[in-house]
Image (cartoon, rainbow, N blue to C red):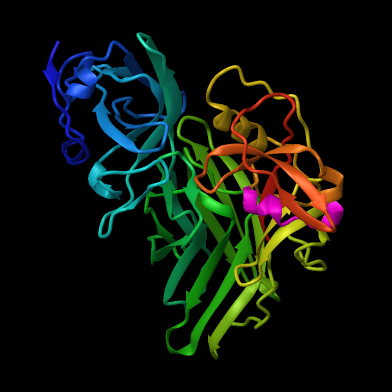
């Protein structure tokens, strides 16, 4: 068995330089060498991560979320599982596994924390990225094995095609937005500074067909995305048309975007976003465009409307969400009018959850993400943050007064808080990090309207 020292900077820069043994035991500093507590970490790739390697860098953080060291797993030529061992003092540790196709595609600090951001490196294309996280506690003299299942955290925009483009069109572009701008070591996506993916299409050998095959990787969409198609007609100007999709674009899926432009009496743009998981057959998500979707018309070419609210896809244009009121039967927690997004609180709640292992956050996140949909509302269902729970008004607060709810704290960790209503003011108790069946889940949903 090979013995070696891994320095954090070397582990980050030299991710691909793996030693050839099935299990590695790291030489640690003297504070660790006398420890009898051994932690063995095994990484796997789950079904659906086609072509992925289970070889990973494991970032260790102590109970205070301070960076301890980086380990590197090795699979001895087999990419079904990989492992590494390390001796540690007794205590609780957070483990974050990171398995990128090429680490040069990403940037993050040399000494990270669980909330440090992993984002696309400047001047680099987005790379494939698989991650996993867990919490492990070591008692004095204890040895423990932790299994981490690596999951792909990016999607692929594979092809973009627009058909029956008029002959006078000189350029076609398609933009899709918004996408998360990064992901933290603890697995939560970064909502700030959302990104747009824009593609310039080229004329194909088939008349009227413009296409591109970018095979571009990206983090998932932040809520339901908007697709914008722009036709440029030489010096006569350009026209843009938008469509708000019915579903979010999620990780570990490939997407084909296609549209057909027709102009009998009016103008209709029809098309489909084809979804293909990394390992499953494609399925179609249909959508329609017409002149009500036109958002800009510069110059004299084309036709359109200046109404910025036209063509908002699957939303109800007769009703606009307002913070503190109800929208489609859901309480409106907050509204971002500039980006036409809102956060809604589920009208239903439930308790009685018992995970049976230490990864409570992943357990509750999975329940929230599969929460029953609300009529007329589509979007990302997730655990609310402390700030979002604190934003509920007195009427909603009184309905939940005295109950303890799952939420996400400022460090992106799972916690619970009690709703307190006093003198027409809603407040929250201090966060609690002990979980059980007595705590309620009431998810929120991110929508685009």
Vertical order, 65 against 446 (above or below): above
Q: Quadrant of the N terminus?
A: top left
Residue 319 in picture, x, y percent from top left: 81, 66
For image coordinates 75% across by 27% down, the residue present is: 438
For image coordinates 37% across by 9% down, the residue present is: 142
Residue 338 in picture, x, y percent from top left: 61, 72
Give the dominant element type of the magenta stretch: helix, strand or loop.
helix
From the viewer's perspective, is 268 left or right of 346? left
Residue 27 in picture, x, y percent from top left: 16, 21
For image coordinates 29% across by 33% down, the residue present is: 68
Residue bounds of the magenta highlight: 385-396
162 within the magenta span: no
Please state which of residues 120 and 436 is positioned toward the viewer in this rendering. Answer: 436
Observer able to see residue 76: no
For image coordinates 35% across by 38% down, the residue present is: 66
Vertical order, 417 against 18 (above or below): below
From the viewer's perspective, is 51 left or right of 157? left
Observer able to see residue 6: yes
Please state which of residues 275 and 439 is positioned toward the viewer in this rendering. Answer: 439
Vertical order, 79 against 448 (above or below): above
């Amino acid at each position: 068995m090979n013995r070696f020292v891994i320095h954090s900077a070397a582990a980050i820069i030299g991710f691909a330089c793996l030693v050839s043994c099935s299990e590695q035991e790291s030489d640690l500093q003297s504070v660790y060498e006398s420890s009898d507590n051994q932690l063995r970490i095994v990484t796997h790739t789950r079904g659906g991560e086609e072509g992925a390697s289970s070889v990973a860098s494991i970032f260790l953080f102590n109970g205070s979320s301070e960076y301890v060291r980086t380990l590197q797993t090795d699979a001895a030529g087999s990419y079904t599982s990989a492992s590494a061992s390390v001796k540690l003092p007794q205590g609780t540790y957070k483990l974050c596994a990171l398995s990128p196709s090429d680490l040069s595609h990403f940037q993050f600090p040399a000494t990270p924390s669980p909330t440090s951001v992993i984002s696309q490196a400047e001047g680099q294309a987005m790379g494939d990225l698989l991650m996993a996280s867990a919490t492990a506690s070591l008692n004095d003299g204890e040895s423990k094995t932790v299994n981490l299942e690596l999951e792909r955290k990016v999607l692929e925009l594979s092809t973009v095609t627009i058909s029956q483009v008029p002959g006078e069109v000189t350029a076609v572009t398609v933009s899709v937005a918004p996408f998360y701008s990064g992901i933290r070591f603890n697995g939560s996506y970064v909502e700030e500074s959302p990104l747009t993916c824009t593609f310039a299409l080229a004329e194909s050998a088939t008349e009227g067909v413009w296409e591109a095959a970018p095979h571009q990787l990206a983090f998932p969409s932040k809520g339901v995305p908007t697709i914008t198609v722009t036709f440029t007609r030489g010096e006569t100007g350009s026209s843009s048309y938008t469509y708000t999709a019915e579903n979010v674009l999620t990780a570990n899926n490939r997407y084909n975007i296609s549209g057909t432009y027709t102009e009998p009496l009016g103008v209709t743009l029809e098309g489909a976003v084809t979804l293909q998981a990394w390992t499953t057959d494609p399925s179609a998500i249909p959508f329609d465009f017409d002149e009500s979707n036109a958002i800009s018309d510069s110059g004299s070419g084309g036709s359109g409307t200046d109404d910025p609210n036209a063509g908002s896809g699957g939303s109800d244009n007769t009703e606009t969400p307002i913070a503190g009121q109800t929208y489609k039967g859901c309480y409106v927690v907050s509204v971002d009018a500039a980006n036409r997004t809102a956060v809604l609180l589920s009208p239903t709640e439930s308790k009685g959850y018992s995970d049976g292992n230490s990864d409570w956050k992943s357990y509750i996140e999975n329940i929230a993400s599969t929460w029953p949909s609300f009529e007329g509302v589509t979007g990302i269902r997730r655990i609310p943050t402390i700030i979002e729970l604190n934003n509920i008004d007195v009427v909603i607060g009184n309905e939940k007064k005295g109950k303890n709810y799952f939420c996400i704290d400022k460090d992106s960790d799972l916690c619970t808080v009690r709703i307190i209503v006093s003198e027409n003011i809603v407040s929250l108790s201090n966060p609690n990090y002990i979980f059980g069946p007595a705590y309620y889940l009431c998810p929120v949903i991110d929508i685009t309207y």
